[in-house]
Image (tube, rainbow, N blue to C red):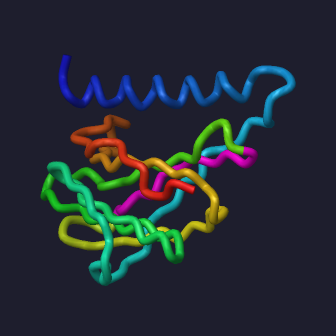
């Protein structure tokens, strides 16, 4: 099984679990995935933790809840970061920030999370033509309440 297929299956499994959690009667209402297209920006400044895999580099700026995403491969695919809040939290959200600006360009997506939010993320390469996820970074907590 190819890396792309495994990454795609993992992302599909995660999203299926999230749908199942919120489809149970008496639980929190289902939420829609927030999909954003990054706007052009310069490289992030300041003390940020950044994560990389082949084709993608991303950073999270907690003050301002900003996702910085860099497409760092000439492969025709986009760089993206998928994020999600703790599904057991009183307010649950999840989404993706796509950098479709091309190789070598930074993009930023602005969000607004509750100060106590627990947020995890993973950055991946995404091919919009095939719908396949490519190389991904490790999943990490970027904001832990």
Locate the N terminus and report the quarter of the image it occupies.
top left
Q: Nearer the viewer, residue 42 or 65?
A: 65
Locate the C terminus and report the quarter of the image it occupies.
bottom right
Q: Quadrant of residue 27?
A: top right
Q: Is residue 28 left or right of residue 104?
A: right
As drawn, which residue projects farthest toward the top? 1
Considering only vertical position in the picture, is 60 above or below 27?
A: below
Q: Residue 73 at what x, y percent from top left?
A: 14, 57
Q: Residue at x 66, y 62 (%)?
A: 114
Q: Residue 63 at what x, y percent from top left?
A: 50, 76
Q: Nearer the viewer, residue 32 or 145?
A: 145
Look at the image and say whether residue 15 sits in the magenta stretch: no
Total marks shown come to: 0
Q: Residue 29 at what x, y percent from top left?
A: 80, 36
Considering only vertical position in the picture, is 42 above or below 139?
A: below
Q: Quadrant of residue 130?
A: top left
Q: Residue 37 at what x, y percent from top left?
A: 47, 63
Q: Which residues are magenta?
A: 90-100
Q: Is residue 35 left or right of residue 131?
A: right
Q: Residue at x 36, y 81 (%)?
A: 41
Q: Residue at x 56, y 51 (%)?
A: 118
Q: Quadrant of residue 57?
A: bottom left
Q: Nearer the viewer, residue 84 or 3?
A: 84
Look at the image and say whether residue 96 sits in the magenta stretch: yes
């Amino acid at each position: 099984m190819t890396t792309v297929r495994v990454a795609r299956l993992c992302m599909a499994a995660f999203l299926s679990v999230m749908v199942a959690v919120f489809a149970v009667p008496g639980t929190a209402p289902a939420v829609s995935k927030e999909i954003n297209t990054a706007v052009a920006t310069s490289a992030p400044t300041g003390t940020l933790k950044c994560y990389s895999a082949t084709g993608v580099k991303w950073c999270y700026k907690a003050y301002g809840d900003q996702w910085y995403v860099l497409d760092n491969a000439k492969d025709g695919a986009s760089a993206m970061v998928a994020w999600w809040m703790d599904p057991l939290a009183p307010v649950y959200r999840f989404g993706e920030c796509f950098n479709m600006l091309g190789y070598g360009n930074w993009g930023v997506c602005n969000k607004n999370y509750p100060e106590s939010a627990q947020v995890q993320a993973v950055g991946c390469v995404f091919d919009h033509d095939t719908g396949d996820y490519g190389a991904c970074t490790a999943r990490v907590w970027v904001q832990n309440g």
